[in-house]
Image (cartoon, grey):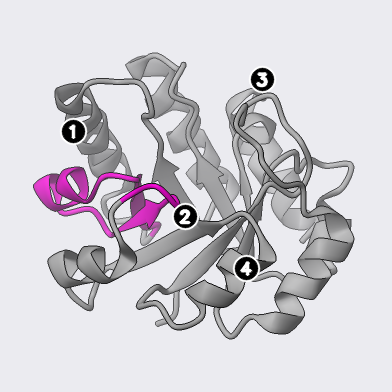
């Protein structure tokens, strides 16, 4: 069965363990189809512990757990895949370590990177950043809707859009034909993540 990228939750590392578990549990109940654990600043042991917490929550839900950046963490907890950035381990090496049965995603931040990625052993591409957002402070390129449409027309790989997407613009983003939409604040920052996920999913 091919992965369902439609509503892709990327976690906010500022959440406590308790809040993280609450958000992910509710978001999955609301219809989130994929969860990525992002821990940019934390220590390795904490990353693994939080990964194990989410693995327990997602057991039996058929929602894949993707680990951001760290192939070693994904292997340690037997996660469903890894999402790499441009400065992380090369995709070819990550695929060799992970094997063929794990999902592998890669963020692309320009048309040149998008074109280069077409020949890499990855399952999907994260298109970042669609709209400027406070959760991503190192934005070097803003795709916008026109950029997304161009990327979609040039890629053989499924695209997942991320950055500044919320209820106000999610339908416009989905209309470009992308396979999925990744969100942080729109779910992690919601008073009721379950309802937020449900409403977002209804728009796509």
Q: Which residue is mark 3?
A: 191
- Based on the displayed image, in which of its 4 quarters is residue 70 positioned? top left
Find residue 48 and name its label.
1
Q: Which residue is mark 2?
A: 34
Q: For marks 2 and 1, give the one nearer the viewer.
A: 1
Residue depicted at 39% across the width and 54% down the height: 83
Residue depicted at 72% across the width and 72% down the height: 151
Q: For marks 3 and 2, give the one nearer the viewer.
A: 2
- Among the two numbered marks 3 and 1 on one chain, the one whose residue lies closer to the N terminus: 1
Indicate the position of residue 116 as horizontal and vertical percent values: 52, 74
Q: For marks 3 and 1, give the one nearer the viewer.
A: 1
Whether residue 138 is in magenta: the answer is no
Query: Furthest-left residue in view?
Result: 76
- Among the two numbered marks 4 and 1 on one chain, the one whose residue lies closer to the N terminus: 1
Instruction: Name the element at disc 4.
Output: helix
Indicate the position of residue 178 as horizontal and vertical percent values: 70, 69
Q: Are marks 3 and 2 in contact (CB under 8 Å)?
A: no
Marks 3/2: CA–CA distance:
20 Å
Q: In the image, which residues are magenta?
A: 63-88
Few, some or many residues within 10 Å of mark 2 (<14, 14–19, 20+): many
Marks 2/1: CA–CA distance:
18 Å
Quadrant location of the N terminus in the rendered image: bottom left
- Among the two numbered marks 3 and 2 on one chain, the one whose residue lies closer to the N terminus: 2
Q: Which residue is mark 4?
A: 112
Indicate the position of residue 2 as horizontal and vertical percent values: 44, 80
- Among the two numbered marks 2 and 1 on one chain, the one whose residue lies closer to the N terminus: 2
Is 18 on the left-hand or right-hand side of 189? left
Q: Are marks 2 and 4 in contact (CB under 8 Å)?
A: no
* Vertical side of 66 occupied by 27: above or below: above
- Among the two numbered marks 3 and 4 on one chain, the one whose residue lies closer to the N terminus: 4
């Amino acid at each position: 069965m091919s992965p369902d990228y439609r509503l892709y939750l990327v976690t906010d590392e500022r959440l406590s363990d308790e809040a993280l578990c609450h958000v992910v549990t509710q978001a999955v109940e609301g219809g989130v189809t994929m969860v990525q654990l992002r821990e940019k600043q934390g220590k390795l042991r904490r990353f693994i512990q939080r990964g194990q917490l989410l693995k327990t929550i997602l057991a039996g839900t058929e929602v894949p757990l993707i680990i951001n950046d760290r192939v070693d963490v994904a292997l340690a907890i037997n996660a469903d895949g890894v999402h790499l950035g441009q400065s992380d381990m090369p995709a070819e090496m990550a695929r060799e370590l992970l094997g063929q049965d794990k999902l592998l995603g890669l963020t692309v931040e320009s048309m040149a990177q998008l074109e280069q990625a077409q020949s890499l052993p990855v399952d999907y591409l994260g298109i970042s950043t669609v709209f400027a957002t406070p959760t991503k402070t190192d934005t070097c390129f803003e795709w916008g809707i026109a950029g997304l449409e161009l990327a979609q027309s040039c890629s053989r790989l499924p695209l997942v859009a991320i950055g500044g997407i919320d209820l106000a613009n999610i339908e416009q983003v989905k209309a470009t034909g992308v396979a999925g939409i990744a969100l942080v604040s729109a779910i992690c920052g919601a008073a009721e993540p379950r309802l937020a996920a449900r409403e977002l999913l209804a728009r796509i």
